[in-house]
Image (cartoon, helix red, strand yellow):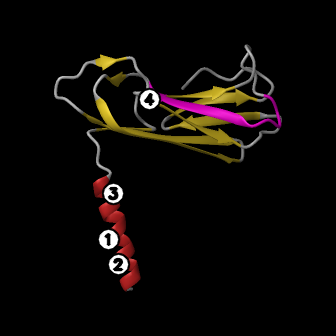
Amino acid sequence: MTKAISAIAIALLSTAACQHDVVYESNSSQTEVCIQGEGTANIVYPDRPIQIVAQTRCSSTCIDNVVSRCNSFLNGNNIHVDTLFAFDLTSDVCTLECGRIETSCSLPTLGDGTYTVHHGDVQTTLKVGEPAPACL
């Protein structure tokens, strides 16, 4: 019982210590996810690893303590991508620039077929053997 309470207390302290001025999660309109195919045609080939790049659409000129995370998993023909971007503002007077914060994650190889990619409330279709879909 004491170990369980200690684990809960540590988890609560860790969460409190990780507070940032700005946080964008998978449902944010400020983030996008791009499937990286191969070559100039951006083809997603069967039985080859797939790279997913997640990025903020724009970020401020005065940020610090950046945390970025991308996690993906396959569940049947559904690819789920979860992202988190968090940072602190270093000044009250910041301009919004189109610098991007970027992170990546990968998927295991996919067999032939059609998959639905989910990022927050947005989804798109990926067909193996064809160009990767537009960023979502």
Disc with the residue nearer the chain's start (3 vs 4): 3
Whether residue 114 is situated above or below residue 98 in the rendered picture: below
Q: Which mark is residue 18?
A: none
Report how far apart the C-alphas of labels 3 and 1 lie in the structure: 10 Å
Residues at discs 2 and 1 in contact (Cβ within 8 Å): yes
Which element carries disc 3, helix, strand or loop?
helix
Direction left: furthest residue: 92
Disc with the residue nearer the chain's start (2 vs 4): 2
Direction top: furthest residue: 40
Give the amino acid type for the residue marked by disc 1 in the picture. Ala
Residues at discs 4 and 1 in contact (Cβ within 8 Å): no
Give the amino acid type for the residue marked by disc 4 in the picture. Ile
For disc 4, the marked residue is: 101
Q: Quadrant of residue 28?
A: top left
| Residue 103 image offset from top left, x and y in percent | 52, 35
**Residue 53 falls inside the magenta stretch:** yes
For disc 2, the marked residue is: 5
| Residue 82 image offset from top left, x and y in percent | 51, 42
| Residue 19 image offset from top left, x and y in percent | 29, 48
Report how far apart the C-alphas of labels 3 and 4 lie in the structure: 22 Å
> Which contiguous range is marked in magenta?
45-56
Q: Which mark is residue 15?
A: 3
Report how far apart the C-alphas of labels 4 and 1 lie in the structure: 31 Å
